[in-house]
Image (cartoon, rainbow, N blue to C red):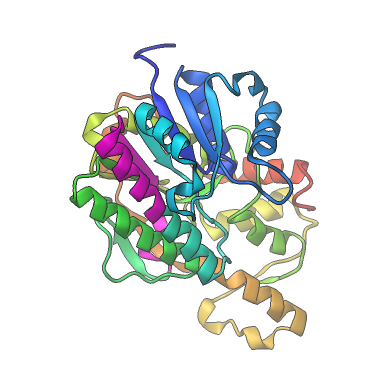
Amino acid sequence: MMNKPPRTLFITGFTGTLGKEFVKEILLTTEDRLYLLIRRQNRFSHWDRARKIFLACGLQYLLGTRVHVLEGDVTLPGFGLRPEEIEEIRSKVQEFYHIAALTALNGSEEECNRINTGGTEKALELAWDFLKQGRLERFFYFSTAYVSGSRQTFCAREDELTPEPAHANYYESSKYEAEKKVRLAMAEGMPATIFRPSIVVGNSTTGEVSEFNVIYPFIKLFAHGILTRLPTRLENSFNIVPIDFVIRASLAIAKTKDSIGKTFHLVTEDPPSIGELMKLKEAEYPSSPEIVIVPPEEFKPEALGFESQMVFQMLEPYLGYLNDHLTFETANTRRALEGTGVALPKTDYNFLKTLLKYATDQGYLLV
């Protein structure tokens, strides 16, 4: 189990879908020690939230031993940590993983900029402090494959950031601005690595996911018959990746020193199409409401009823993912994963079937 001495890691975004599974994988496969930043949420303290998550996965016995939780907020200077807490992290942490983000595709401009762009800026400020005065060796940033913007036909290069993005929502634009800050820090000497996952969905084998967010609410609108007309084309594809691939790939890449200064697309090279999704719907859920595919240029939102128009406004931030023609270079990722046992994922018909079955079994999709 042990190939090297335990490391000490500082991780933001633990309470999110990706963060939970990321931390769980580290605890189950290494002896690394973790500092987790968790914010208070209404009447629930950071300890309350941590205990609930660790109890659910049976790892509560690690709290206070290998796992230390700190109350903080990525939008505050110094994450709102006390001076003595910053000093402790500075003196111990070797790797800093900034995962925290607002991933809601319908998030407001203010929220996305405050959490995604501003939070990354605050993370870099701490990282510079830890690098110059402490033991920090690496900074890892989780961006998105869609920093180029999903409203265009484009091949995104791993080690480049397009100067002409075409963003479909504030999530994309705020992550673009955040990655610009990380790239500037890299140019100034920060030993950073950038991961760009596409749309993260459930486990590749079971379909399991802790929260139904990002693309799942979009699917729910159609599965429940709330909207029945979809402006896209059957041949269009959507790039989704299983959460276990994103975690295993990023951790494998993080172990390599030559990943410093590089960006890695954590995507599928053969994304499923809208046609495959419709085929699955007809074969597995024949009683679900009919969905009419309408060419985007012929779709007229104003022709919808009042309620449907309101719902369509909620849907608009998602449409770029169904009508883009983005492709992603994966040379860095392929090279880094050679010999690790981690391969770029298959996201075929059977994978879609696994995802929808899990969501249905959990009562999220009533089809």
- Residue at point 32%, 38% (across, down): 130
> Which residue is at the far front?
83
- Residue at point 65%, 28% (across, down): 54
Asked if residue 135 lies in the magenta stretch, the reply is yes
User: Residue 17 appears at what percent x and percent y?
Assistant: 58, 43
Q: Which quadrant would the N terminus be assigned to in this image?
A: top left
Which quadrant of the structure image shows residue 145?
Answer: bottom left
Instruction: Name the foreground residue: 69 vs 301.
Output: 69
**Residue 136 appears in view:** yes
- Residue at point 49%, 55% (across, down): 75
**Residue 144 appears in view:** no
In the displayed structure, does residue 17 sit left or right of residue 341?
right
Specify the segment rendered in magenta: 121-150
Q: How many marks?
A: 0
User: Residue 209 appears at what percent x and percent y?
Assistant: 63, 40
> Which residue is at the far left?
188
User: Residue 106 appears at what percent x and percent y?
Assistant: 58, 66
Instruction: Name the foreground residue: 3 vs 61.
Output: 61
Asked if residue 39 lies in the magenta stretch, the reply is no
Q: Is residue 76 shown above or below 233?
A: above
User: Residue 26 appears at what percent x and percent y?
Assistant: 48, 26
In the displayed structure, does residue 309 sit left or right of residue 275?
right
